[in-house]
Image: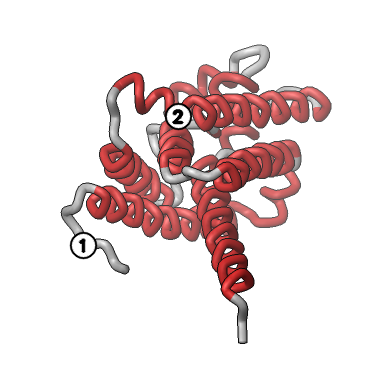
Amino acid sequence: MVSPTTAAEEALNSTYVKFSLLALSSIFFLVDPFAAIPSFIAITADVDPARRRRMAWKAALTCFIVLLSFALAGQYIFSLFGIKLPAFEIAGGLILLLIGIDMMEARRSPTQESQGETQEAASKEDAGIVPLGIPMLAGPGAISSVMVLVGQAPNHWQMLAILGSITITAFASYLVLSGADRIRRLLGETGIRILVRIMGLLLVALAMQFFVNGLTDLGLIARKH
């Protein structure tokens, strides 16, 4: 017979794992460093490998700082503007849905990157912070996702899961961008498109879940017990 304490611990661990996976998947899919590979290669076409790695590092560090800032300030922003979590869940779900649909067509969403930004960045001495770090990696979708997750994280361990997910995503972004040429040769254009489409499909499902959560919190959809 399982003791009440053991059952409670198992339930807590299960909830922690589910929330951690939700946080990591939503943040990583929205940052989506694989989809940024073609733009990163175009922007860094005429630079040496060492400088390319520095730009990848600056982009990843900028992404980390921006998302971390919104994670830590999310509750204060909600309070400052009088925004309720359900409203942000619905708005964030809509943004995620638009980005996910674009990803399913194997193209970058205009909310993350525009053609003009890519061309302008190619002529810059160092585009690691703007536009690579923001908005290509830390765009409106990723910021919205972080703030929604923060609103759903009343416990310290959930907040730690979000901060850990941001850290893992930023480090993975550095690895992907710094090895962009090798990854592109390994996967090819078709492989990258397939990967982006799969991420887009999962992102659309996540967007609908955010939307449903918002409607449920507003009382428009019955909550399951």
Q: Determine if residue 193 is in view.
A: no
- Dot 2: few (<14), some (14–19), or many (≥20) neighbours within 10 Å? many
In front of the other: 156 or 105: 156
Residue on which the image places disc 1: 222
Residue at screen point 57% across, 73% down: 4
Q: Are marks 1 and 2 in contact (CB under 8 Å)?
A: no
- Tell me the quadrant of the picture where the N terminus can be found: bottom right
Q: Looking at the rendering, which quadrant does residue 12 occupy? A: bottom right
Residue 16 vs residue 93: left or right? right
- Tell me the quadrant of the picture where the C terminus can be found: bottom left
In the picture as drawn, the residue positioned furthest to the right comes out as: 50
**Residue 138 % position (x, y):** 52, 31
Q: Identify the amino acid type marked 2.
A: Gly
Q: Relative to 116, does residue 186 appear above or below in the rendering?
A: below
**Residue 104 % position (x, y):** 41, 54
In front of the other: 24 or 113: 24
In the picture as drawn, the residue positioned furthest to the bottom comes out as: 1
Residue at screen point 40% across, 55% down: 206
In front of the other: 137 or 177: 137
Q: Relative to 183, does residue 42 appear above or below in the rendering?
A: above
**Residue 184 % position (x, y):** 67, 48
**Residue 120 % position (x, y):** 52, 17
Q: Considering the numbered disc 1 on the image, is that residue within a helix, a strand or a loop?
A: loop
Residue at screen point 47% across, 43% down: 154
Q: Considering the numbered disc 2 on the image, is that residue within a helix, a strand or a loop?
A: helix
Colouring scheme applied when the structure was drawn: secondary structure
Residue on which the image places disc 2: 74
